[in-house]
Each structure stands twice: as C-alpha cells, then as structure tokens.
Image (cartoon, rainbow, N blue to C red):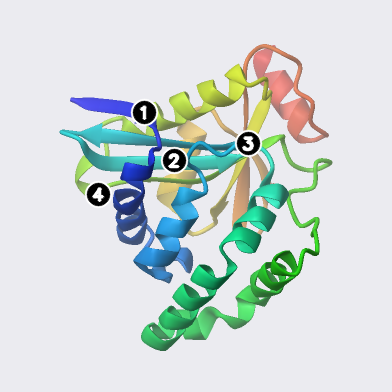
Amino acid sequence: MVTYRSLQLDDVPAAARLHRSVFRGYFLGHMGQRFLELFYDEFVATRGNYGMVALVDETVVGTVIGSVDLAHTFNDFYRRRFWPLAWAFLLQVIRDGYVRRHTAVRLAHIVKAIQSRLGIRTSSGPDPEVWPPAQLLSIGVASSFRGAGIADGLIERFCQALASDGVDAVGLSVRSDNHRAIAFYARTGWIRGRVDPASETFWRRLGSAEIKAPDPFANALNARER
C-alpha cells in the first residue's frame, strides 16, 4: 500500500539516494549524497517550498519538490549553506569525471552561490511574465515502482498543497530527450508551453480561478476549460 505525506527531515537521506538513482544521468544526480541531502533539506517545512514523498512499508519510493519563489529559495540556499555546499561540490569535482566535464556550463550557478554568500541578491528566478507562479522542480519514482500511479499521486498532492495556498498555476521544465516524462505530462493533462532543442515546458492550472499568466500559456489553459 502506498501512502503519501509531506517531506520530513527523516526522509531527506532516502530522498537524496532516490534522486541519485533516478537522475544518475543528470548533473545534480552526480553531486553526491551530502550535496543532495542539503538540497532536499531546503524543501522541508520551508515557507514557499513544497516537498512530498510516497512510501511503501515506510520506505521512500517517490518524491516531488517545488517552490513558489525560486529566486528567494536559491539565494537563501546558497547563502546559508555555502561552505557545506562548496566542500561537497569540490569533493565531487575530484571524484566524478562527469562533474568535471560539465562544471563549465554551471558557472552561472557558482557565481550565484558566491553572490548569495556575499549578500548580493540576484534576480535569476523565473520571469513572472513568461512563467507561472510556482514551479515543480523534480519528481522521481523508484524504478521498481513505476507504472503504479505513484507519480500521479505525488503530483496531485503537490498541486493540492499549492492550490490550498492560493497558487493558481504551476509549471515545469523537462529535458527534450526525456521522452518518458514528456509523454507522462502530455497524458496527465499538462499543457505544453515553450519547446526548444534542450527542453520543453509544461503548465497546469490549479483550481477554478482565471489563470494569471501571459499568452500563449494563458490562452492555451483557458481554452482547455471551454
């Protein structure tokens, strides 16, 4: 039997291990257990951040995390945890050739971390003119439990939590080569937004209020309701 609950501190190590397993081909999946524990800890009972887990026999088999204020979330994340993050990152640079090869394209994140540590506020969160109020950052289900509806259950509870806090829309970005995820979002009623060679974005309307989002996404979402 699958049960769901908000992400708790005791879930963080298991959530980090699950992320490493599910996203082993992604940069964050190569950042190591310590880095990911720090990352998931940011979504435990933090205002504006949301985390949910799915459990089978008290074992974490699925996670979803998101935020309504990414710029603030990551500024605080880098500022408060700068040195643990820095040491965890440097250790992975030494250990993992994938991290070394892909660090150059992540320089913007490194600069942002340093700016946050120095108290320089950045504005690199999603542009409200082209992105909905909230963003789903990551969802993962253990391979042995896929196809059991766990991803659907996680998303529904995540969206319910957002809607209960007055959020009217949520978006996400997925790599264009992740065909399984793209098919899942298309099948479960998400609206495709921007498409480029690297990624695709999807939107979902929450509740019955008129969507407060710019064209073309607002038109697509509202037209679906008619």
Residue receiving disc 1:
5
Which comes before the other along the chain, label 4 or label 1? 1
Disc 3 residue crowd, few under 14, some 14–19, many 20+, Cα 10 Å: some
Alpha carbon separation for disc pair 4 and 3? 29 Å
Residue receiving disc 4:
143
Location of residue 111 in the rendering, given as x and y in whole percent from the top left corner:
71, 74
Location of residue 73 in the rendering, given as x and y in whole percent from the top left corner:
64, 49
Residue found at x 61% / y 59%: 80
Secondary structure at badge 3 equals: loop
Q: In this view, does 17 lie to the left or right of 81?
A: left
Residue receiving disc 3:
48
Alpha carbon separation for disc pair 2 and 3? 14 Å
Residue 225 versus residue 212 in the image, above or below: above
Closer to the eye: label 4 or 2 = 2
- Check whether the beta carbons of the residues at disc 3 and disc 1 lie within 8 A of each other: no
Alpha carbon separation for disc pair 4 and 2? 15 Å
Q: Quadrant location of residue 19?
A: bottom left
From where the camera sits, is residue 68 visible?
yes
